[in-house]
Amino acid sequence: MHRALHWSASLLLTVLASSVCLTHALPSILSPNASSVWTAASVQSVVWDIGEPDISPNAHGRVVLGYIDPIADEGGFYEYDDQPLSDDLLVSEGIIDVVVPTALPSGRYYYCVLIVGDARTRSEVFSIDNPVNPSTSTAKVVFPSTLSVGKAPPKNVSDAK
Ligand SMILES: *[C@@H]1O[C@H](CO)[C@@H](O)[C@H](O)[C@H]1NC(C)=O
Ligand SMILES: *[C@@H]1O[C@H](CO)[C@@H](O)[C@H](O)[C@H]1NC(C)=O
């Protein structure tokens, strides 16, 4: 009897915990999106939807770049977690300017990830155009392990309005 009670209590806690997680889902990324083309070394804005509720006003986060390796067997998602494009953004601002790394092969392989604590949200897959590393056949594409991450320009708060 006691044991049954214990189990249902922990089940209830699990259900509560997962619904809490759901209501704290991160905002979706609006840009970059499937129609975006970023040129290497340019300054680009990552924009997310701050119209959604439940963003703590002081939440800080970071943006990293990911790619889908076209020749990997199992999905081939890779995210440059240790080389963020921006490592201390204010989530409530809804925008951060980043410098597009210069070490990447051209092509439609890339996405951005907004990371806040343990939660992450991914953009649509978009293209990077790198004049010094033009697109090649997908069978030959090589992704670098080290990005040349440029220093992000100062935050442009006036853009966030
Ligand atoms: C998609 O991204 C582009 C910039 O790359 C932006 O101008 C456009 O507004 C975005 N689309 C949506 C629906 O936010
Ligand atoms: C920052 O905002 C100002 C005023 O809106 C604009 O003139 C300038 O081009 C912006 N800078 C960047 C890097 O977007």
Image (tube, helix red, strand yellow):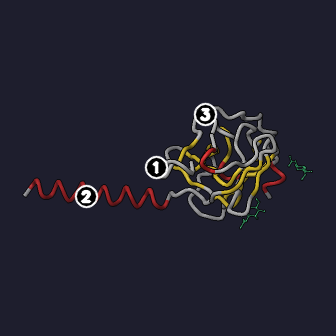
- For residue 93, the mark is none
User: Which residue is located at x 30 percent, y 56 percent?
Assistant: 13
Numbered label attached to residue 11 = 2
Mark 2 or 1, nearer chain start? 2
Q: Amino acid at mark 2?
A: Leu
Label located before the other in sequence (1 or 3): 1
Q: Position of residue 32 (x, y in %)?
A: 70, 57
Q: Residues within 10 Å of mark 3 (few under 14, many from 20)?
A: few
Query: Is 11 displayed left or right of 19 in the figure?
Result: left
Q: Residue at horizontal 17%, vertical 54%?
A: 6
Vertical placement of residue 47 versus 89, above or below:
below
- Towards the viewer: 137 or 147: 137
Give the CA distance from mark 2 to mark 3: 42 Å
Q: CA distance from mark 2 to mark 1?
A: 37 Å
Horizontal and vertical percent for residue 70? 57, 51
Along the line of sight, which residue is nearer the eye, 145 or 136?
136
Q: Which residue is mark 1?
A: 73
